[in-house]
Every structure is written in C-alpha cells, then in structure tokens.
Amino acid sequence: MLKKVRVRLPVGRPRTTPGAVAGDKAYSSRGNRAYLRKRGIKAVIPEKRDQAANRRKKGARGGRPISHDPGLYKERNTVERLINKLKAWRGIATRYDKTPDSYLAGLHLRAAMIWIDDLVKTAD
C-alpha cells in the first residue's frame, strides 16, 4: 500500500514517502519496522507486550526499546473512523468485487459519497 502513496504539495511533484506511518499492534513485526526504517519513515506503532517481554528477557542482546509517539498514535483514530465509514458500504466491507479495478472504483465512489455528505453537513 505504501508504494501507492502520493502526497500532493502546493508546488512540484507529489511526495511518495510519508513522514510517519501509524498502525496498531498487529503491525509491530520486525519486518514491518525494518521496511519502514529502510525507507526513512517513522513507525508510530506500539510494541506488543509479548514482544517487549521477549526483548527484556534477552537483556542487552534484545536491543533498544521501541520509540513510540503517543500524540501521533492518537491521530490514527481519524483514519480508522474513515475506514469504518468506507466499510459501511456492503460492497467494500465484503469485498464482493472480484477485480482490483472495480474494487478501487467502489472505494472512490464511496469516498465521494462521504465527501459530499460531509459538505452537506457543514453547509447546514
């Protein structure tokens, strides 16, 4: 998914590397963190309790504790609420569309519906 990131700027070509990636504890694997580190992206992912316990059990060989920014992690909630709004549409939640193109078209359609709904709410 990170390969498709395009952050538009006021001038110039879009950025393809986000400053940080926030994820829940399910994405705290060593492989995910190594991938983000290799691309120079800050990982805002809390460490699982069992991973932290294993690291501490190894002592000095276990490495350094994972740095975690709680402020950035709280902002992840905004993205999760959007995903829940997208999944409110049955076609997206069930992945009924078989081809990637039709699924992406459904995502775009649902996102446009959410955007229009938000415009109507702010106009009232």
Image (cartoon, rainbow, N blue to C red):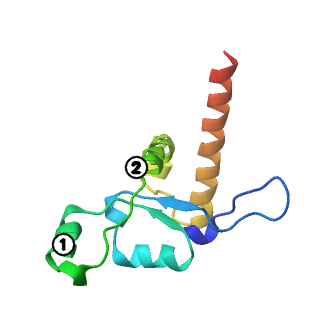
Residue 93 versus residue 84: which sits nearer the camera? Answer: 84
**Residue type (three-letter) at the residue carrying disc 2:** Pro
Q: Quadrant of residue 99?
A: bottom right
Q: Position of residue 14 (x, y in %)?
A: 76, 63
Q: How much space separates mark 2 and mark 1, taking CA atoms?
A: 21 Å
Residue closest to the far left: 57
- 83 relative position to 101: left or right: left
Residue at the (54%, 61%) spot, across then down:
20
Residue 99 to residue 8: above or below = below
Q: Residues within 10 Å of mark 1 (few under 14, many from 20)?
A: some
Q: Residue at x 34, y 59 (%)?
A: 46
Tell whether label 1 touches label 2 (CB within 8 Å): no
Q: Quadrant of residue 116?
A: top right
| Residue of label 1 | 56
Residue type for callout 1: Arg
Between discs 2 and 1, the one toward the N terminus? 1
Q: Which residue position holds label 2?
A: 70
Residue 6 sits above or below residue 58 on the image: above
Q: Nearer the viewer, residue 122 or 113?
A: 122
Label 2, secondary structure: give it: helix
Q: Quadrant of the C terminus?
A: top right
How far from the left and from the top, in percent, is residue 57?
14, 75
Q: Quadrant of the N terminus?
A: bottom right
Q: Is residue 13 left or right of residue 99?
A: right
